[in-house]
Structures are given as C-alpha cells and as structure tokens.
Image (cartoon, rainbow, N blue to C red):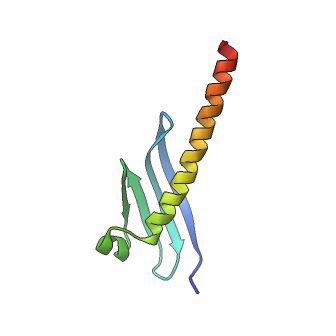
C-alpha cells in the first residue's frame, strides 16, 4: 500500500496567463518530503529517482496539476475575451 502524499506550499508566477515558474513540496510518502520546481519549461525534483532517471512520480503529479491549472487559465482568458467582445460590439 502506498503512503498518502499531499502537495503543500505551492508558489507560482503567472505572466500574461502563462505559468513561468511553479514550486511546491510533496509531503509524505515512503521517501519523505521532496521539493519540485518548474522553471522555463524544465522540471526538477530533489528525489533520488529524478536525480537518477530525470523523471519521478513527484514531477508527474506536478505536470498533471499544472495542466489542470493551465486549462483553468485558458477558460478564464476565454471568458474575459467573450466579455470584452460583448462590451465593445
């Protein structure tokens, strides 16, 4: 059975509806806490798996979360554009 893991302390920089950097801590799990960072398209994690293979479950979790956030930003931008068009035309 896997230990429960949670994402804590998320920090994000968004410029023009583009996520520039994203950092968070994965708490719990059998190997302890780990820090994951996304910066300019590159992912990093301080766990042994990432250092050995350049991929890990912590980064995968971050990628899934970031995709969901990006989908939300796209929907917000689409709604803002539609509201702007209604007010202009």
Q: Is residue 87 above or below residue 65?
A: above
Placement of the C terminus among the 4 image quadrants: top right
- Where in the figure is residue 54, as x and y percent of width and height? 32, 68
Residue 70 locus on image (x, y percent):
54, 46
Q: 28 or 63: nearer the eye?
A: 63
Tell me: 24 left or right of 46. Answer: right
Q: Relative to residue 53, is residue 7 depicted above or below?
A: above
**Could you say which quadrant of the image residue 80 lies in?**
top right
* Furthest residue in direction bottom, as rendered: 1
**Which residue is found at the position 44% from the left and 70% from the top?**
34
User: Which residue: 52% across, 78% down?
Assistant: 29
Res 3 → quadrant: bottom right
**x and y percent of residue 62 in the render?**
49, 60
Q: Depth check: give the residue in front, 34 or 16.
A: 16
- Give x and y (percent) for residue 45: 38, 66
Q: Report the number of numbered marks.
A: 0
Residue toward you, 6 or 82: 82
Work out which quarter of the rendered image holds the N terminus and state it: bottom right
Single out the residue that lies furthest toward the left: 52
Q: Residue at x 61, y 45 (%)?
A: 72
């Amino acid at each position: 059975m896997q230990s429960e893991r949670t994402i804590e302390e998320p920090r994000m920089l968004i410029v023009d509806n583009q996520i520039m950097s994203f950092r968070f801590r994965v708490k719990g799990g059998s190997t302890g806490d780990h820090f994951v960072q996304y910066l300019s398209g590159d992912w990093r994690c301080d766990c042994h798996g990432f250092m050995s293979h350049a991929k890990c479950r912590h980064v995968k979790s971050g990628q899934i979360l970031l995709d969901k956030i990006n989908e939300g930003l796209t929907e917000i931008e689409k709604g803002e554009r539609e509201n702007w068009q209604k007010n202009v035309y």
